[in-house]
Image (cartoon, helix red, strand yellow):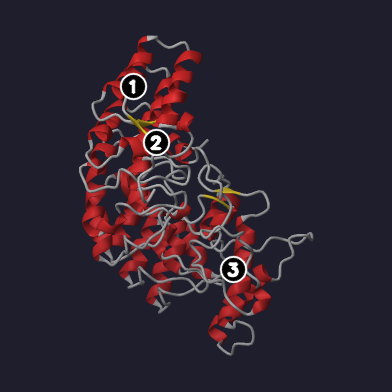
Amino acid sequence: MASPDEASLNEAPSPNEGASPDGTALEWPDASSGTASPEPWTLRYQGHGDGIGDYPIELCLHIEECMCHSCADYVKLNDETSFSRFLQVDAMTTSEAFGLEGTLNLNYAIQEQFIMEYRDRDELKDQPKPRCLFEPDPTERVPRAIVDGDVETLRQELERGVDPNKLTSSGIRLLSLAVVHLQVECVKLLLEYSADPNSRGYWRDARPLDYVIPFFIVETDFMQAAIIEFLINSGATFTYANVFHTICRMERLDLMVQAVRNGTPLETIRCSENATLLHRASIFPCRLGQPFIVNYILQQAPGLLNVKDKKGRTALHYALLGGNKQMPQFLLRSPVDAMAVDKNNESALHIAVRRLRHADVVALLNRPGVDIATLHMKGLPAFSPLCSALASGDARLIRIMLAHPRMAISEDVRSCAFVLRRRLGLSPDLFRLIAKLPYTQAMPEGW
């Protein structure tokens, strides 16, 4: 079951759900065209489900098929596809883009053969599934030792000259393999032998730190935290939201700071729904260190403050939808755009009212830059802030809205409010208060 915070983000889905960011239908890349898909692998398939882009696709496949743990609560694929299908399409575009067929580089012949297994597989026929990228062939001595946690064998092989940056037959680096299998000592040993903490695989774009097992899979944080700490202190960076989620849950601002010093691009990383790391940090449950992490992100990447995700939501929208009661007030102390509306014409005030966040409603009504009358002209009158307050039946919220000195509405909202009061059997005194509210008929220019 999805967490309350993530479930709240899926309320009132946008009309363009399942489409690419420009509103067109998202199609599978055509391998026969000879042109690779222009989207990065972190974003290519976002039109085929929710949560795609937070975790490497190959990691999700490993979690489901090898660890027997469903990712459905966090990555919800549409019915017509699968993680295996994504890898198959990637294999097609990889082959075409990099000319893997016919290459004379014998060092990578095994990796190319593995990719062909995915590319040439016909899902409509009864064929065995290709091997998981993180499950080495039994004949691979070093990768097998890592999976089994055989530190002594790994040490012996490294002392004999085995390259710590070696690729497995599936094109995965040894360090990434150790991370996925939570082999802390193997991770430490590979780093001691100068394994590159930022090396990518042969045909996958994730780095070792991106392969940390997600927090919703690992029962204890000890091994996960140790691996993250070893990697970051060795210079590792990340490009997916996966490890960022875990760092936030661990409240390790020190690790975040070091990851940025290592070169992690906070401003350019995009999660599912095209959300930024600031979006994600803003929705996490209330924790002691959370405002410090958000503040650090704003210091390093102030341009993220008013960036919108695929549904048009800013970090302030996320904060109000989440369970962190401190975060909206924290963001409102910054130059955040409190007038921003999402694709459903919902502003921060709309959400605060709908979720009965009294203190946040007062803060937004008090904010000088919030044009309350204009916000009441966005969307249908029945879903305006005032009408939502009336529909909630929350007496305190209704009084806050009606008694505020800056309160102003549109004529249509006023009429709708009269109807709601009567139909819901609310106090007759509210009729007088609603009638006293100033109202306008014209939408300001630019809206």
Amino acid type, callout 3: Asp
- The Cα–Cα distance between marks 2 and 1, rounded to whole angstroms, is 25 Å
Amino acid type, callout 2: Gln
- The residue tagged 1 is 397
- The Cα–Cα distance between marks 3 and 1, rounded to whole angstroms, is 51 Å
Label 2: few (<14), some (14–19) or many (≥20) C-alpha neighbours in 10 Å: few
Q: Residue 90 carries which label?
A: 3
Inspect this view and state whether residue 352 appears. Answer: yes
Q: Write down the quadrant of residue 347 in the picture.
A: top left
Which residue is nearer to you in this view: 204 or 407? Answer: 407
Q: Along the horizontal axis of the image, is 268 left or right of 143?
A: left
Label 3: few (<14), some (14–19) or many (≥20) C-alpha neighbours in 10 Å: many
Inspect this view and state whether residue 222 appears. Answer: no
| Image point (31%, 20%), residue name | 436
Q: Residue 441 carries which label?
A: 2
Label 1: few (<14), some (14–19) or many (≥20) C-alpha neighbours in 10 Å: many
| Image location of residue 312, percent across then percent down | 43, 49
Q: Along the horizontal axis of the image, is 79 left or right of 37?
A: right
| Image location of residue 422, percent across then percent down | 47, 13
Amino acid type, callout 1: Leu
Which SS class for mark 2? loop
Which one is earlier in the sequence, the residue at label 3 or at label 2?
3
Residue that sits furthest to the bottom in the current view = 104
- The Cα–Cα distance between marks 3 and 2, rounded to whole angstroms, is 53 Å
